[in-house]
Image (cartoon, rainbow, N blue to C red):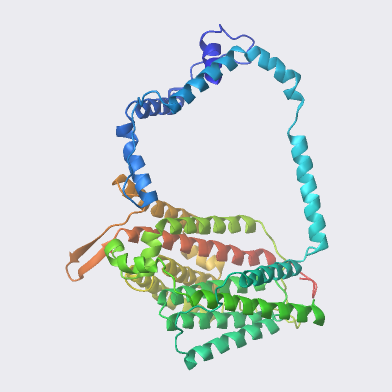
């Protein structure tokens, strides 16, 4: 109906009168995109087996992970149900076009008066009002209350789940022998966690406890043969500590007590019950035999991805599309934080809690000297971790964190102005280049007739260097490296620059 009206009004309805402007032929380059679409429609419709079939084969094979099923692409498939449905649609469109005048009058008389926005906004307002009543009744705008009810409901459903079925809580899988090292490590984690919770009123002390927990978790990863996770944990821990330290500058060093003893007892009891429940759930899962996809990755890491570091092969090859999505989210988050902090000014304390002014020596000479000496070494370590990542613990993500920390430390030790004069690249551009490289790596495999992000590897021999393996996934890993470096610097440098606008803002003691 729309096409008939368009063709009739343009070509067979005479000249249009009373137009605000005189129609004219559009420029050539405005018509080229339309011409391309028209040509594509004609070519695909006339010779689909040549134009569309290869693309469908790649997409279907990658999705099904199996041989391509039988299908037929042709201009004419005979008289069948799809053809009859198309004819019915054509006839219905012609009927609507012929009755358009009567339909226009019906619309003007009845339909035009109906505004769907009125009932929509009415229902929306009622839903919001109901949500407000529920929240005021239960959580009362408190995140603590909201978490309390969430945990209570989770425990309730967990108890219901434990009560159904004939399965025992603990499976038949054999347990490992208990060693004293594991017991000591777990005990230290529990003690440090309790120390952090009990000392949370002093934020800097709590930060030290969190750092200790992160370090112990990294040691646990090493004990259970997960060096990649240990390196990642340590790198993320350093970045997180720097981020929290920058944020603590704008927060009071101590927080007042806001909970009563009764409330603390209820929260503590609920936390213990929830912890026991999570522990039992974990025990029930780990004590049962089950097949995992890990065996496939272990068996095909070398032959399929060309690397002995299974974790890295999974990230850049087997699950490369997931990694591409993750670095895209990381880039979006970094740019979002940058935008939110762009024109933000925060009240910062001009004195410490005892009333003493901050030190005038903002950048100690010893720290400046050491960080400048360590910069090339840290960058060299980052390059080493990056290059070895496909066969040994490492990779683009860990190397990116190390390189980002190496550059951020220069800002901390030497100041923003000094460092900015020497580090002239824009972190946002680094993020864009990293995403572009990672995406083009996947597109390159498609141009060669393989599924998106399919990797390849080969062995080369160079004089002096000797034999070594190179995989196309290193380009994708380079994109990951650049995105992580750019995102880390974008967030931390932007947060650090807030202090430039807050030094001259005076504040009253206790009102921070």
Outermost residue on the front side: it is: 166
Please indicate whether residue 182 sits to the left or right of residue 80 in the image.
right
Q: Specify the quadrant of the image occupied by residue 478.
A: bottom left
Front position in the image: 57 or 290: 290
The image shows residue 23 at horizontal and vertical percentages of 55, 15
Q: Residue at x 80, y 58 (%)?
A: 134
Please indicate whether residue 249 sits to the left or right of residue 470 in the image.
right
Q: Is residue 352 visible?
A: no
- Labels in figure, total: 0
Q: Is residue 89 visible?
A: yes
Front position in the image: 46 or 337: 46
Please indicate whether residue 78 sits to the left or right of residue 431 in the image.
left
Q: Residue at x 71, y 70 (%)?
A: 152
The image shows residue 189 at horizontal and vertical percentages of 57, 85
In the rendered view, would you say 372 is above or below 67?
below
The quarter of the image holding the C terminus is bottom right
Outermost residue on the bottom side: it is: 180
Q: Specify the quadrant of the image occupied by residue 281.
A: bottom right
The quarter of the image holding the N terminus is top right
Q: Specify the quadrant of the image occupied by residue 17.
A: top right
In the rendered view, would you say 380 is above or below 129?
below
The image shows residue 98 at horizontal and vertical percentages of 59, 12
Q: Residue at x 45, y 28 (%)?
A: 82
Q: Residue at x 77, y 25 (%)?
A: 113
Front position in the image: 231 or 356: 231
The image shows residue 65 at horizontal and vertical percentages of 36, 52
Front position in the image: 243 or 73: 73
């Amino acid at each position: 109906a729309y096409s008939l009206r368009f063709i009739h009004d343009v070509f067979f309805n005479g000249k249009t009168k009373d137009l605000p402007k005189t129609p004219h032929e559009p420029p050539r380059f405005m018509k080229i995109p339309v011409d391309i679409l028209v040509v594509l429609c004609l070519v695909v419709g006339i010779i689909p087996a040549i134009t569309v079939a290869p693309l469908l084969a790649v997409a279907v094979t990658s999705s099904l992970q199996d041989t391509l099923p039988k299908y037929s692409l042709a201009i004419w498939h005979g008289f069948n149900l799809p053809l009859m449905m198309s004819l019915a649609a054509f006839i219905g469109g012609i009927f609507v076009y012929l009755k358009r005048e009567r339909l226009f009058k019906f619309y003007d008389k009845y339909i035009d008066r109906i505004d769907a926005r009125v009932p929509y906004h009415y229902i929306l307002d009622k839903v919001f009002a109901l949500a407000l009543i529920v929240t005021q009744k239960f959580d009362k705008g408190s995140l603590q209350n909201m978490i309390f009810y969430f945990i209570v409901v989770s425990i309730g459903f967990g108890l219901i789940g434990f009560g159904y079925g004939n399965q025992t809580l603990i499976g038949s899988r054999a347990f490992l022998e208990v060693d004293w090292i594991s017991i000591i490590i777990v005990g230290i984690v529990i003690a440090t966690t309790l120390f952090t919770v009990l000392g949370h009123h002093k934020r800097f002390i709590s930060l030290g406890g969190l750092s200790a927990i992160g370090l112990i978790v990294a040691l646990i990863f090493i004990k259970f043969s997960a060096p990649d996770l240990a390196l990642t944990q340590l790198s993320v821990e350093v970045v997180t500590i720097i981020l929290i330290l920058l944020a603590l500058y704008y927060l009071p060093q101590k927080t007042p007590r806001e909970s009563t003893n009764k409330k603390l007892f209820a929260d503590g009891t609920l936390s213990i019950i929830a912890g026991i429940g999570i522990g039992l759930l974990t025990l029930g899962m780990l004590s049962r035999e089950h097949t995992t996809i890990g065996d496939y990755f272990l068996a095909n890491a070398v032959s399929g991805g060309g690397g002995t570091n299974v974790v890295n092969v999974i990230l850049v090859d087997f699950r490369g599309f997931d990694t591409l999505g993750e670095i895209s989210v990381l880039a979006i988050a970094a740019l979002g934080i940058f935008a939110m902090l762009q024109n933000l000014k925060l009240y910062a304390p001009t004195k410490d809690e005892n009333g003493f002014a901050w030190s005038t020596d903002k950048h100690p000479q010893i720290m400046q000297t050491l960080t400048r000496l360590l910069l090339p070494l840290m960058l060299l370590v980052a390059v080493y971790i990056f290059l070895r990542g496909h066969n040994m613990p490492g990779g683009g993500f860990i190397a990116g964190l190390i390189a980002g920390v190496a550059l951020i430390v220069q800002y901390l030790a030497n100041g923003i102005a000094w460092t900015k004069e020497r580090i002239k690249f824009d972190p946002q551009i680094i993020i864009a280049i990293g995403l572009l490289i990672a995406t083009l790596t996947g597109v390159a495999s498609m141009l060669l007739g393989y599924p998106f992000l399919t990797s390849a590897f080969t062995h080369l021999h160079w004089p002096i260097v000797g034999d070594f393996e190179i995989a196309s996934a290193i380009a994708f890993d380079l994109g990951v490296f650049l995105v992580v470096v750019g995102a880390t610097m974008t967030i931390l440098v932007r947060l650090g620059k807030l202090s430039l606008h807050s030094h001259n803002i005076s504040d009253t003691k206790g009102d921070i």
